[in-house]
Amino acid sequence: MWKPPERIRHPLPEARWPSAQEAARSRLFSPLEVGRLRLAQCTWVPAMVPWRATEEGFVTEEVLAWYERLARGRPGALVVEATGIRDVPSGPLLRVGDDRFVPGLAELVAIVRRASGGETRLFLQVIDFLAIRRRPEKEKFFRRYLEVGPELLGRIGAASEAEARETLLALPDEALERLLAPRDWEAYAFGYRERVTDLHLPRIAELPRVLPGLFAAAATRAEAAGFDGVELHYAHAYTMASFLSARNSRTDGYGGPREHRVRLPLEVLAAVREAVGEDFVVGCRMLADECIEGGSGVEDAAWFASELARAGADFLSLSRGGKFEDAKRPRVGWAAYPYTGPSGYECMPTAISDARGPFGRNVSAARAVRAAVRSAGLDTPIVVAGGLATFEQAEALLADGGADVIAAARQSLADPDWWEKVRLGRGGEVRRCIYSNYCEGLDQMHKQVTCQLWDREDLDEPGVLRSKDGRRRLVAPDWTGPEGGGSA
């Protein structure tokens, strides 16, 4: 992962945990009812990808255990990982692109309902992503993959395609970067990656025609499985976020000016809303800032958020960064990972950081987005995440209008019961995330995600699910609250 030039070690913020009585009076643990979104408390576990599905995208015992454990902490809402809307191979990630996935997802819903005592609202995050390939071996790329046309022949000064290939194979990367067209260099150095601007590819040109129906079908399956709603994934490095990006230069009415870039996200939202029941929640995950050169900034995000809210989004969950454009060059045989560059760091900063530090890094941008939505006369709930891990931090944000709901991913991974411990006046027992990004490192390697604070604890305990190599436990140890509260 990219590291900022400044290497300042930031201690965890001091935490003053409330008594049970104080927690009961707090905004954090009060109900939220705005439109269709109804939460027992203003706490939220955002989507994390644990790499526990089958290669075909089905729910497994490990998937069920992961969400059951998170649900025992009884957050107001729990969002199930990015789940593919297409019926195409995508590795050990959940899918919802066909009816055959519904029974497994229904079992997941039932387990969360039971584990949370029916308190936690459950949303399925639905996502589309474009093709990306692994970084190729040099010889394979230049002998098999590279298209050698007249322009490249002229730049090299070669008389034939065969001569050009041999010449390129012998050159160092510095020379290759100067000679190759930018997209050819990228395909060689990072691996081939499709963009929403590749209008010469029929499958890319037809995205506006195809995606609303695919998202709508996915949402109807989520509804059939018993989810309370869906979260449309409009964030980070994926298809819908790329339509919103200021880098989207499509010339077909879906790129260029902001009004055109938001067109497909609005059409997807409308198609989903029309396909599901009146009480089914449809929200969006989006970026408060892309954090890349030439990308969309906070002003764009505020405008997009207002448009999505005006179109009927039931909530807006805000993240930042996590883009391919500044990702680190991967090793041969590995695919580019959008959280390895500066924008990826903005999404998941560590305790060793620049002067801004990792705690609440998205707050100022999110505050601006929420203010714009409120100025537009809209009360759409704004969910804010990013290094929020103390009661006072959360309560202050809710009190001063910085957020409507507080989300925490890494802290919830470190201690799935932390919300419940705080609510019960037992905050001193919270296992606090140290923001080392051990979990992110596992995610980058597509390994089952765990937390270093507990994944070696009581490995020989009966019934403990272990990672594929047998060295780590896959869910956090149990915690028993007072008189049956908390986890059992």
Image (cartoon, helix red, strand yellow):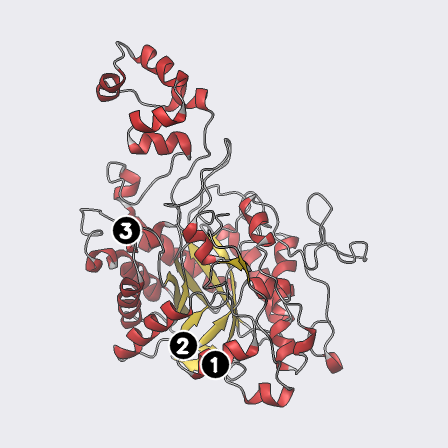
Secondary structure of the residue carrying tag 1 is helix
Residue 191 horizontal/vertical position (percent): 42, 34
Residue 250 horizontal/vertical position (percent): 22, 47
Relative to 425, say whether 336 is above or below. above
Asked whether the viewer can see residue 459, the reply is yes
* Label tally: 3
Residue at x 68%, y 59% (from the top left corner): 453
Residue at x 27%, y 12% (from the top left corner): 158
Tell me which corner region of the image, top left, top right, bottom left or bottom right, holds residue 431: bottom right
Secondary structure of the residue carrying tag 3 is loop
Residue at x 64%, y 86% (from the top left corner): 19
Residue hosting label 3: 294
Tell me which corner region of the image, top left, top right, bottom left or bottom right, holds residue 212: bottom left
Measured Cα–Cα span from mark 2 to mark 3: 27 Å
Q: Which mark is residue 396?
A: 1
Asked whether the viewer can see residue 322, the reply is no
Residue 279 horizontal/vertical position (percent): 41, 74
Do the residues bearing badges 1 and 2 touch, measured as CB atoms within 8 Å?
Answer: yes
Kind of residue indicated by mark 3: Gly
Q: Which mark is residue 402?
A: 2
Q: Which mark is residue 313?
A: none
Instruction: Please tell me how crowded label 2 is: few (under 14), some (14-19), or many (20+) other residues with Cα within 10 Å.
Output: many
Direction from residue 76 to residue 189 in the image, left or right: left
Instruction: Please tell me how crowded label 1 is: few (under 14), some (14-19), or many (20+) other residues with Cα within 10 Å.
Output: some
Q: Earlier in the sequence, mark 1 or mark 3?
A: 3
Closer to the camera in the image, 213 or 321? 321
Kind of residue indicated by mark 1: Ala
Residue 54 horizontal/vertical position (percent): 58, 46
Relative to 58, say whether 148 is above or below. above
Closer to the camera in the image, 84 or 102? 84
